[in-house]
Image: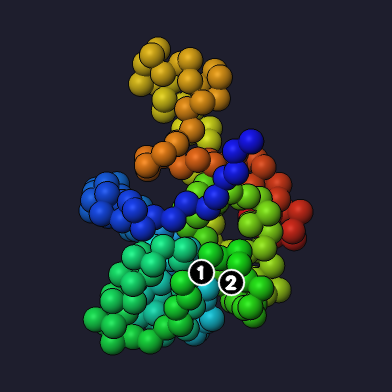
């Protein structure tokens, strides 16, 4: 029996930074997120929770627009980098070195909750999503970004026949010290969970 744990990026910090954040793909991801969240950035000050903040780029951007930020991450290295970015910008925020689903029990509800590229690294993605969704106040918002399992299958099949057997026997999902997440999610399941919780998509 294999016991799965949430992924902590402390041991992959340098690789994650160079392969994700310091790439054109990473730059475009942040740019598109800012486009999606622009109306919130321009809104009256909100209480925002970044559930799995990474290096805190989006949180800092929202904080620069006068929103109150609470950030958490399981990775101490990621969280410390986020803290440094806030300190350099002379902006205050609340930081927790803890997993989102564990910390949620101690937190109030928020106007906006960010959960970006977190679910696919968790041992229990759907249960964790429910816990995180509960922290969105009535009338509030959840910004959710997750690794699409359908897209993962599609891209691997396009890369050639040698990748087909792992796709067919479902062994292609990231293992070990790879940056391919262990639990990519099917969009229809995530959307059903959100609708069941009362969210409009």
Alpha-carbon neighbours of circle 1 within 10 Å: few (<14), some, or many (≥20)? some
The residue under the point 71% across, 47% down is 192
Quadrant into which the C terminus falls: bottom right
Label 2 crowd bin: few (<14), some (14–19), many (20+), radius 10 Å: some
Does 31 appear above or below 113?
Answer: above
The quadrant of the image that shows the N terminus is: top right
Q: Residue at x 54, y 41 (%)?
A: 183
Where's residue 140, x and y in %?
A: 63, 72
Q: Which disc is residue 103 wearing? A: 2
Tag 2 and tag 1, C-beta contact below 8 Å: yes
The residue to which callout 1 is attached is 98
Drawn side of residue 36 relative to residue 24, left or right: right
Q: 23 above or below 41?
A: above
* Identity of the residue drawn at 45% across and 60% down: 36
- Given residues 115 and 34, the one toward you in this image is 115
| Residue 45 spot, x, y in % from top left | 49, 85
- Residue 92: x percent and y percent? 38, 87
Splitting the image into 4 quarters, where does residue 27 fall? bottom left
Q: Is residue 176 above or below residue 131?
A: above
**Label of residue 42 in the image:** none
């Amino acid at each position: 029996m294999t016991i799965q744990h949430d992924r902590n990026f402390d041991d992959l910090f340098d690789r994650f930074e160079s392969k994700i954040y310091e790439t054109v793909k990473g730059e475009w991801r942040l740019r598109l997120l800012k486009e999606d969240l622009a109306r919130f950035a321009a809104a009256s000050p909100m209480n925002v929770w970044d559930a799995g903040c990474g290096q805190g780029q989006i949180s800092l951007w929202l904080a620069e627009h006068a929103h109150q930020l609470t950030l958490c991450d399981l990775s101490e290295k990621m969280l410390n980098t986020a803290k440094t970015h806030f300190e350099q910008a002379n902006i205050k925020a609340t930081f927790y070195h803890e997993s989102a689903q564990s910390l949620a029990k101690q937190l109030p509800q928020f106007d906006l909750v960010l959960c970006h590229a977190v679910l696919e690294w968790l041992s229990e993605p759907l249960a964790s999503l429910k816990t995180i969704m509960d922290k969105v106040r009535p009338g509030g918002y959840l910004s959710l970004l997750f690794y699409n399992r359908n897209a993962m299958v599609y891209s691997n099949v396009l890369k050639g026949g040698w990748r087909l057997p792992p796709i067919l026997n479902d062994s292609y999902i990231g293992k070990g010290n790879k940056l391919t997440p262990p639990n990519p999610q099917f969009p229809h399941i995530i959307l059903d969970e959100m609708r069941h919780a009362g969210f409009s998509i």
